[in-house]
Amino acid sequence: GAVVSQHPSWVICKSGTSVKIECRSLDFQATTMFWYRQFPKQSLMLMATSNEGSKATYEQGVEKDKFLINHASLTLSTLTVTSAHPEDSSFYICSASGYSGGINEQFFGPGTRLTVL
Amino acid sequence: GIQVEQSPPDLILQEGANSTLRCNFSDSVNNLQWFHQNPWGQLINLFYIPSGTKQNGRLSATTVATERYSLLYISSSQTTDSGVYFCAAHRLSGNTPLVFGKGTRLSVIA
């Protein structure tokens, strides 16, 4: 299957700082990537849809000025958590769709665990 | 949007036992996938199965699209099968985000 990477895998930062998370599709091009957030013992919640060359589409309740998304190329999307606060601590996961044989299957990165002190 | 419900929420099995996990969805689907989230958080793709039946080793899955449910079968369970199993779906074609169920937390004990 297709491979999606994320960097960093974990980060600890002080309150008020900004953190950038990278999501890359390693062996396929992804015009669209998705960002999810997962709190402990809960399911994945979609935050935004990242479109190459255009603005991201955010889900209701997600602050677009706080969670900046840039889809700079067909293989890279970044999520920047600006002025992070302890309540932003979570597990952030990206995904990308890969077309193969008429199937549009989603593949997920390994996630980034953010802890804001 | 589509609603995805999974059952049971928790399951404890003795090693070697078989199990069936269920996923109900509220609308017709264009994409349905099963994932296993390992203890480190990585989502492992198990099946892409909007309809029909597939098998991969000890795992198999069946989706009955007309009745809006999917089943994941685990046979001869092993301790390494422990983790959370998610069903996710969407009803549109193309690059549309998956909607996740709440998952089934499986613990396999030796």
Image: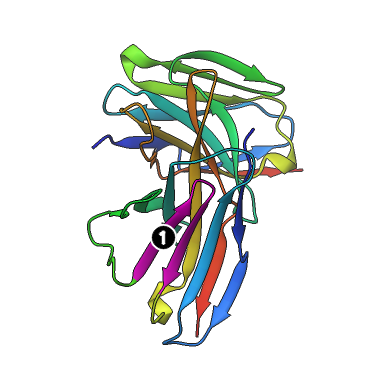
Q: Which x, y percent locates residue B52?
A: 48, 12
Q: Which x, y percent locates residue A16?
A: 41, 87
State yes or no: residue A94 in magenta.
no
Type of amino acid at the residue the image marks with label 1: Asn
- What residue do we see at 46% from left, 43% from top? B103
- What residue do we see at 28% from left, 62% from top? A62
In the image, the segment drawn in magenta is A67-81
| Image quadrant containing the N terminus of chain A | top right
- What residue do we see at 65% from left, 56% from top? B40
> Which of these two is toward me, B86 or A117?
A117
Q: Is most of the magenta stretch helix, strand or loop?
A: strand
Q: Which x, y percent locates residue B43?
A: 58, 45
Question: How many tags in the picture?
Answer: 1
- Of helix, strand and loop, which one carries label 1? strand
Left or right: residue A33 compared with residue B29: right
Residue position marked by numbered label 1 in the rendering: A70
